[in-house]
């Protein structure tokens, strides 16, 4: 029996470990968690319809010039970078579930500040708070989903993170057609409030509970997530085989099993942002206005709709095609949108998951800030053609990096992925 378990840990999962009939409560837990990325998407999409409106308001204390508009769009990424650091601490100390529930506070607080704004600095502060919540969300939700899902559906459920982000962006674009900027902020509050309510009834992840020596609670969590017809003890032993009770010291980052996945995760986040996607999403309406589109708002909605459709396609096929195949495809929504977040949640060992994920999220949002803040300066220096050719060159570099350094994680348990890095 022990030899059989050892083989299943290092190779493929035992054939009867995850039956075809899946428990619906796993999908309910995933839905509750991805309400966070939906909120995150509303934060990202908010600036696109709002910047043109705030550039024309009668109140001079709230009117944005071109420089202030770039700060309004990009300052959210500074808050998100700080949120990545805070999220890396919270996810290990407070747990995955409480960290998600805490995200609702800065989301709602930030929008309240924006709704009541009397000057530009209040707008900036509100954006920073919503950015802080987005940074925590972007770290915690992929970790939560990867730890509650099983290998057969982890890719699909993990891709739902990016799907809900682009859905939130599209929702902000559509709502921005009819709603004024204050009422749009009111609407943006709702997903995070619903997430707080739903997450209250969801379990903590079994891996976090076992890492805290709470075995009975971990079994209860597995019973909720897997249903009554699965061998919970088998999966619990699989996880326990890789749980290490001692804390993580900085000297351990010399260990290839820790620094190699960290470097891969950081590189994935760097390359995701230098594709220039957030510059397009943050300033979609302004870009279409500059391109002399007759209806720039509707053009933005079309872009958002395409993002949602192709991200949904990626979620449906990712567990069949694998991660690397989709990263070779040029489209952002099919590959470089959802997959870096998914891979980040899969490759880190349990004891380094918080700090390593925090480093990745920090990298992502710092690069997002640089790209979105300097986007207009790049266009002035390189012209529009040169700027987008530069983004294209980085896309080519993405493919080369993927081919040589990114491992395929399709169909493997998190414990098998950790064992892979220990052996290599």
Image (cartoon, rainbow, N blue to C red):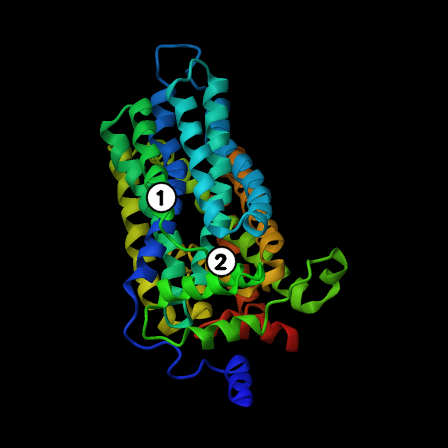
Q: Please state which of the two labelled residues, at mark 1 or mark 2, is closer to the viewer.
A: 1
- Say whether residue 105 is left or right of residue 382: left
| Label 1 crowd bin: few (<14), some (14–19), many (20+), radius 10 Å | many
Element type where label 2 sits in the image: helix
Element type where label 1 sits in the image: helix
In this picture, is 416 found above or below 64? below
In this picture, is 398 found above or below 174? below
Mark 1 or mark 2: name the one nearer the start of the chain.
1
| Label 2 crowd bin: few (<14), some (14–19), many (20+), radius 10 Å | many
User: How far is mark 1 from mark 2, CA to CA?
Assistant: 23 Å
In this picture, is 181 found above or below 287? above
Give 71 or 211, whichever is nearer the viewer: 211
Residue pointed to by mark 1: 195
Q: On residue 401, which mark appears? A: none
Give 125 or 406, whichever is nearer the viewer: 125
Residue 280 visible somewhere in the drawing: yes
Residue pointed to by mark 2: 340
Which residue: 61% across, 50% down?
A: 359
Report x, y in % for residue 322.
Answer: 42, 71
Q: Pick out the residue farthest to the front.
A: 216
Report x, y in % for residue 136.
Answer: 50, 44
Report x, y in % for residue 307.
Answer: 33, 51
In this picture, is 208 found above or below 62? below
- Say whether residue 196 is left or right of residue 180: right
Give 156 or 267, whichever is nearer the viewer: 156
Which residue: 49% across, 24% down?
A: 124
Which residue: 58% across, 38% down?
A: 82
């Amino acid at each position: 029996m022990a030899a059989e378990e050892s083989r299943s840990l290092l190779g493929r999962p035992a054939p009867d470990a995850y039956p075809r009939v899946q428990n619906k409560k796993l999908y309910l837990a995933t839905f509750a968690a991805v309400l966070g990325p939906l909120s995150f998407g509303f934060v990202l999409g908010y600036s696109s319809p709002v910047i043109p409106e705030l550039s024309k308001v009668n109140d001079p204390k709230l009117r944005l010039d071109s420089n202030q508009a770039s700060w309004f769009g990009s300052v959210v990424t500074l808050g998100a970078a700080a949120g990545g650091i805070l999220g890396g601490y919270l996810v290990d100390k407070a747990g995955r579930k409480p960290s998600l529930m805490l995200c609702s506070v800065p989301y709602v607080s930030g929008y309240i500040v924006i709704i009541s704004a009397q000057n530009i600095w209040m707008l900036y502060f509100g954006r920073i708070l919503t950015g802080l919540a987005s940074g925590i969300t972007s770290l915690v939700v992929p970790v939560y989903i990867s730890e509650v899902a099983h290998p057969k559906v982890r890719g699909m459920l993990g891709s739902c993170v990016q799907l809900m982000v682009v859905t939130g962006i599209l929702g902000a674009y559509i709502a921005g057609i009819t709603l004024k900027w204050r009422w749009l902020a009111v609407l943006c509050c709702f997903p995070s409030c619903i997430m707080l309510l739903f997450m209250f009834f969801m379990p903590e992840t079994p891996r976090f509970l076992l890492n805290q020596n709470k075995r009975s609670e971990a079994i209860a969590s597995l019973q909720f997530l897997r249903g009554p017809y699965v061998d919970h003890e088998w999966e619990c032993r699989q996880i326990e085989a890789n749980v290490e009770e001692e804390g993580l010291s900085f000297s351990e980052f010399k260990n290839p099993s820790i620094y190699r996945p960290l470097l891969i995760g950081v590189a994935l986040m760097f390359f995701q942002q230098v594709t220039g996607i957030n510059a397009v999403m943050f300033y979609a309406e302004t870009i279409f206005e500059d391109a002399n589109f007759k209806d720039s708002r509707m053009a933005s909605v079309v872009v958002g709709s395409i993002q949602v459709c192709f991200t949904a396609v990626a979620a449906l096929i990712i567990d069949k095609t694998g991660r690397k195949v989709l990263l070779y495809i040029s489209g952002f929504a099919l590959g470089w949108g959802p997959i870096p977040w998914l891979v980040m949640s899969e490759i880190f060992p349990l004891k380094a998951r918080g700090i390593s994920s925090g480093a990745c999220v920090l990298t992502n949002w710092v690069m997002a800030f640089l790209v979105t803040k300097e986007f207009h300066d790049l266009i002035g220096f390189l012209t529009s053609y040169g700027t987008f050719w530069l983004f294209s060159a980085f896309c080519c570099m993405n493919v080369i990096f993927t081919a040589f350094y990114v491992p395929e994680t399709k169909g493997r348990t998190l414990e098998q992925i950790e064992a892979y890095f220990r052996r290599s």
